Image (cartoon, rainbow, N blue to C red):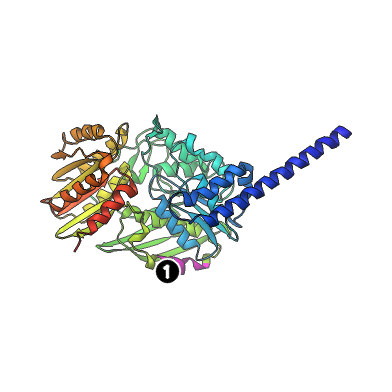
Amino acid sequence: MEEFKYIVSIVKCMELSGKIRCQTAKVSGKLAKKMVKLGKGMGKSFPGYLFLKIGSYDCLKELAKTPRVGSIIITGTNGKTTTTKLISLLLENDAPISYNYDSNTLNAITTGLLSDNIDFGVFEYGIRDIAHAFPDEVCKLVAPIGVVYTNVSREHSLVAGVSNPFDKYLLAKELLSRPMKTGIVVCNADDPRTASIGTKKEADVHVNYYGFDLKSDDDNLLKPDIDCPLCGSKLTYSVMFSNHRGKYSCQCGFERPNPDMRLTELKKEFDACYVTLEGKVYNHTTDKEIPVFLKLKTPAFGLYNLYNLLCAVTTYASFTNKPENIENTVNKITKSLDLSILPPGRFEIMKVGDKLVGMGQGDNGDALNANVQFMCEYVKDDLGFIYTTPDTGEDDIFEDHVQSVIAAKPKKVYVVPGRTSVDAAKDYYEKISEYLDADFYPLPYEEMANRRTKIIDLILNSPYKYIIVSGCGPEHYMWAELKSELKTHMD
C-alpha cells in the first residue's frame, strides 16, 4: 500500500513538472513573440522554436487547443501562400484568427498558436518529404479541423542531397490529413493527385471538392501524360484546364469527383477577370450544407490564382461561423484585391516601353506551364523566352519545364542558370537547343546582380515585343529584385 502511494506521488510530481514546463514554454514563447517584430524569416518561427525547445510535443498538443473552433492547415506544391492569405482575409471578417504564411514550418505554426482570444488558426505548411516534415505527426500534434490541398506537382526531387521520388513526395502530402477522424478536407477536384487524397478520406471526414466547370479551348495547353494515383495506368482527359488539372478518368474506375464549389463562368480582360462561383459546401460549424452563388471581379492574375481564389472561398465557406456573411465578405475582399496579394516572385505581366513582359518564378512544371498559359493569352506576335534552369539532379523538373517551353512556341530561347550549377544549366541548354533556337549565358550564382543585369539587358534589347521570363530561382534574391529592377524601365 505504501509503495502504491509512493508511485502515485511520483506521478503527481511528474504531472506538475509537465504543467510547469508547458506554462514556462508558453510564457517564454509569448514574450519572444512580443520582442520579435513579426515579419519575414525568424520573426515568424523563433517564438515557436523557443516554445518547443523549452516545452515538448505534449505541450504543443495543449497549445493546439487555443483556437476555440480549431486550426486549418494549407499545403500543396503551388499556391499555398496566396491561398492562405486569401483564406485569412475572408475568415478574419467573421472571427478573431491567427495565421501564418511565407514561413511554412511547424515552428511558425506554433508561433501562430501563441495567441490569445482566437477562434481559428490558419496556417500554411510546406512539405518536402516525410523525414523533414513528419506530416502525420504534425496532424496528430495540431489536431486540425481542416486540411486544405491546392495541387501537387513534381517538385523537391532532391531534399538535403537525397533523392525524393515523386511517389514519396505525394505520400508526404497525403499523410498530413491521414490521421484526421473529424473535420473537413478541402481538395482540388481537377487535380487527380489531390482528388485521390480526398477519395481516400471520404470514409473518415467530410471532403469538400472545388474545381472548374468550363470548356477548354486553349491550343497552348500541354497534353498531359499523367499516371492514375490509384492504379498507375494513364489517365484519360476529356477537358484540360492547366497542366494536369482537368476532367479525367481511369480504367480502374477512378475519376474526377464532382466539385462542391465550381467556377462556372470566366470572362478575361487585360486588367480584370469576371467569374461566377457557385455550389453547396458542407459547413463545419453549423453541420449543414451552405448554398453559395457569387459573381466577382478579380485582378487579371492568371488561371492558377483563380484556382487559389476558388480554394479560398471553398475553405472559407467550409469553416466560417457566420455563413450568412459569405456573399458580402467575399465581395468585399475581392474588390480590395490587387497584385500585391501575390508573393514577391510570382508571375506578373508588365508593359515595358513597346514590349509586353511576363516575369516570375516557375520552379516546377505546373508553375511554369501556368505562366506560359497566362502569357500566351496576350501574345500576338513572335515570342522571346528567357528560361532560368533547374539545378543538378532536377532532371524531372526540367522534363516538365521543356514541354512548357516548347508549347509556348518561342522564336528564340535565352537560357540562363536559375540555381547554382552552371554546368547543369549548360546540359539543359543543349537539350533545349535540340528543339528550339537557343543561346546560353553561363552566369554564376555568386554574381546574382550580374545575372539580373543580363536578363534586363536581354529584355530591353530583344527584337521581340513579347517576352516571357520564367523558370527556377530564389524568390526574393532573384525574382523580386528582378521585377523591381525591370519596373524602373517602365513608362
Q: Quadrant of residue 214?
A: bottom left
Q: Which residue is mark 1?
A: 332
Task: Write the residue at 24% across / 32% down.
Answer: 423
In this view of the protein, which residue sits in the foreground, 146 or 194?
146
**Where 104 sits versus 225, above or below?**
below
In this orientation, which residue lies closer to the viewer: 257 or 75?
75
Outermost residue on the left side: it is: 463
Residue 184 in view: no
Compared to residue 198, the image places residue 92 above or below, namely below
| Nearest to the observer: residue 253 or residue 160 | 160
The question of residue 215 being in magenta is answered with: no
Residue 397, horizontal then vertical, whole percent: 31, 37
Q: Residue at x 50, y 48 (%)?
A: 45
Label 1: how many Cα within 10 Å (few below 14, some 14–19, many 20+): some
| Residue appearing at x 35%, y 56% in the figure | 342
The quadrant in which the N terminus is found is top right
Say what amino acid the circle numbered 1 marks: Lys
Left or right, 373 with reference to 331: left
Residue 491 location (% of width, % of height): 18, 64
Magenta region: which residues? 324-333
Q: State the predominant SS element of the stretch in magenta.
A: helix
